Image: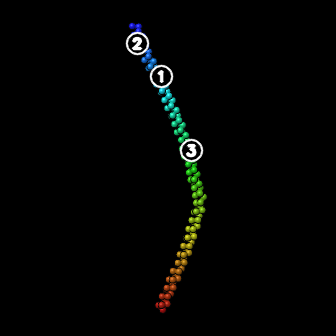
């Protein structure tokens, strides 16, 4: 009886040792996997943050450049608009003046031609 009890106790004890060893192995494996996962996640987070910072910087620089160009164009237009309008107004006045002179010439020529035709008709009639 004593030998059977000792054998059962050893069998039970050995099984418990194996169970504990397996649990300890699983805990270590899980711990290392967890640590590696955390390390990889941290690396990915840092990489993502660096990429976002870089993209933000490039976008910001592009927007600043675009804003400067737009402001420059607006300023150029603002400065040149009075000159352009002045030239356009001056050209329009010249055109109107020339048109008025031509209209007057055409009127005088038409008047002379009419009187000449009437005079000629009158001479022919006499």
**Residue 46 visible in the current orientation:** yes
In whole angstroms, how far apart are the C-alphas of marks 3 and 2?
A: 72 Å
Marks 3 and 1 in Cβ contact (< 8 Å): no
Circle 1 sits in a helix, a strand or a loop, which is it?
A: helix
**Residue 78 visible in the current orientation:** no
Mark 3 vs 2, N-terminal side: 2
Task: Name the residue carrying label 1.
Answer: 24
Would residue 116 be found to the left or right of residue 2 on screen?
right
Badge 2, how many Cα within 10 Å: few under 14, some, many 20+? few
Q: Position of residue 41 (x, y in %)?
A: 51, 34
Q: Position of residue 82 (x, y in %)?
A: 59, 61
Task: Name the residue carrying label 3.
Answer: 57
Residue at 60%, 58% in the rendered image: 79
Mark 3 vs 1, N-terminal side: 1
Residue situated in front as seen by the camera: 76 or 59: 59
Badge 1, how many Cα within 10 Å: few under 14, some, many 20+? few
């Amino acid at each position: 009886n004593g030998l059977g009890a000792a054998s059962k106790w050893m069998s039970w004890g050995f099984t418990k040792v194996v169970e504990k060893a397996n649990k300890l192995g699983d805990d270590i494996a899980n711990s290392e996997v967890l640590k590696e996962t955390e390390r990889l996640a941290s690396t990915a987070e840092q990489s993502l943050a660096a990429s976002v910072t870089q993209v933000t910087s490039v976008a910001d620089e592009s927007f600043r450049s675009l804003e400067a160009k737009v402001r420059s164009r607006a300023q150029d237009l603002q400065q040149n608009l009075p000159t352009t309008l002045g030239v356009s107004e001056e050209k329009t006045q010249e055109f109107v003046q020339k048109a008025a002179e031509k209209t007057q010439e055409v009127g005088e020529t038409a008047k002379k031609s009419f009187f000449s035709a009437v005079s000629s008709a009158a001479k022919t009639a006499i």
